[in-house]
Image (cartoon, rainbow, N blue to C red):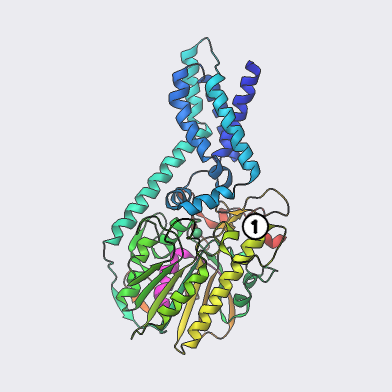
Amino acid sequence: MKYLDVVITLLLSILLTIGVGYENRMMIAGGCLFLALIFLSSKWWLKWLFIFPTGLVAVLYFYSGYIYGQPNIGIVASLFETNKRETIEFLLAIPRNVQILNAILFVAFSYYLIRVKFVFKWHKTVCLFGFFCFCFSSLNLFIYHSYTSINHYVAQMNTLKNSIHQSANWHILKNKPRYKTYVLIIGESMRKDYMSSYGYPINSTPFLTTTPGILVNGYLSTASHTAVSLPRTLAISHGLDLHPANNIITLANVAKMKTIWLSNQGFIGQYDTAVSAIAVHASERKFLKKGNFLTNNTSDYALLPLFKQALAQPYNGSKLIVLHIMGSHENFCDRIKKDIYNFKDKDLSCYLSTYNQTDTIIKTIVNDLKATQDSYSLMYFSDHGLNNVSTIKGKTQLVHGDLYKQDYEVPLIEIASDIHQHTMLNKQISAFDFMSIFSNWIGVKTAQLPSLNVYQLPQNKKIQVLSGNQMVLFKSLKNDPDEIIHR
Ligand SMILES: [Zn+2]
């Protein structure tokens, strides 16, 4: 029987280590967990007061850990900001093998708690050694990373919430808008390398591939999750710090523009999500995601009539209309009306169809802008990329992640009434500089920011991104093992 107990404890250690996202540290973190579980099994109270609560949280985290890795501020934000519909979508999309592994983990954990008991002679020394091993175990790493991530997230949300009642301290030096209408489309989970406009062999973005415009090839998102990335893109930030009151909307407001925010992204409370804390400053706001979770999977197309209304509103000065779309958010098949590719690889097929949808939406908006006969400029970027975690050849499973370059390599495109050529600008630009680009775009100079367009921004080979809970050099990241360029 003891032999079986050892095998089950070993299996439990391996599954827990994988389930909290540390499979790359299996030998040390997993090995220490195994020793801790053995040495701490002699006393019931140790197991139930110590191993049970921490282990239970890890068992419940298994789906997230297996798919997205160890806890980070982005995962915490997603957990806190996910509505019921997104939770259901997430649970329905869990692959069968992950469900089976989670069931095995649950059985092994229960068996360990009820049946496993190793008694040693020098039990106090053994218990101390057990605690020592626990300190270096994957479970302890999990607790530590969960704690720091939640702390970061709570601090970020407090900063964002406080900013709602703060006024920005913009000091305007010059204000001369070039266009009558500015449109900013904030995309979702769109990797640059799956876009035909950036060289993907399938024509996934037909309009953007040929339209006159400036396409930045080398634009890097600040972070890998919406709630972490966008407050650092749309407001002043240099890394972990946030200055949300000084954001694109408050800047446009002091520049006397009319600001309209149209969103198809979810929110729990009135202004509870990271992005709505910026949107709240707009003079007009419309969020499509209301009502109960079964009816609120709204298509991005529903934003188009709202956009037309916003465009038609008479206004003497310039207007800024922001559209925050669901774009290519997981689960891809739920985002679209029709899978237009019908590949065997369903995930890829739906993912590319979301690209086509966003491309069509941008095209429709550009046509609406042209029809006004007024000058206009439209900017599109995506909040972050994704990476492929599928281990099955010919099957794609793209998810949020922060370990790969492709999690950050996203499009930045400008289309305007006075841009007549299709230009690819090969240059690494950080989304941390988006505020500079934005202020230049709307023709504003401030005391707080350099006002530079994508051509003027200095070349920076040391661009950092927020990965996990820290800033890391972008070039130190690995390529997604399934990087499609080489397919
Ligand atoms: Zn996102």
Establish if 183 lies above or below 433: below
* Highlighted magenta segment, given as a residue range: 425-442
Residue 71, x across and y down, in percent: 49, 44
**Residue 28 visible in rendering:** no
Q: SS for tag 1?
A: helix
Establish if 304 lies above or below 432: below
Query: Please, what is the dominant secondary structure of the magenta stretch?
Result: helix
Residue under label 1: 347
Q: Quadrant for the C terminus, please.
A: bottom right
Establish if 196 lies above or below 66: below
Q: Quadrant for the N terminus, please.
A: top right
Residue 471, x across and y down, in percent: 47, 53
Q: Amino acid at mark 1?
A: Asp
Between 289 and 295, the residue placed more toward the observer is 295
Q: Determine if the C-beta at disc 1 is less than 8 A from ligand 1.
A: no
Establish if 166 lies above or below 379: above
Residue 94, x across and y down, in percent: 59, 47
Is 41 positioned to the left or the right of 181 in the image? right
Residue 257, x across and y down, in percent: 34, 78
Q: How many marks?
A: 1
Residue visible at 30% across and 75% down? 254
Q: Quadrant of residue 344?
A: bottom right
Residue furthest toward the bottom?
A: 373
Is 421 positioned to the left or the right of 158 in the image? right
**Residue 299 visible in rendering:** yes
Residue visible at 68% across and 48% down? 391
Residue visible at 56% across and 19% down? 115
Between 425 and 34, the residue placed more toward the observer is 34
Dot 1: few (<14), some (14–19), or many (≥20) neighbours within 10 Å?
Answer: some
**Would residue 328 be counted in the magenta stretch?**
no
Between 242 and 161, the residue placed more toward the observer is 161
Residue furthest toward the top?
A: 121
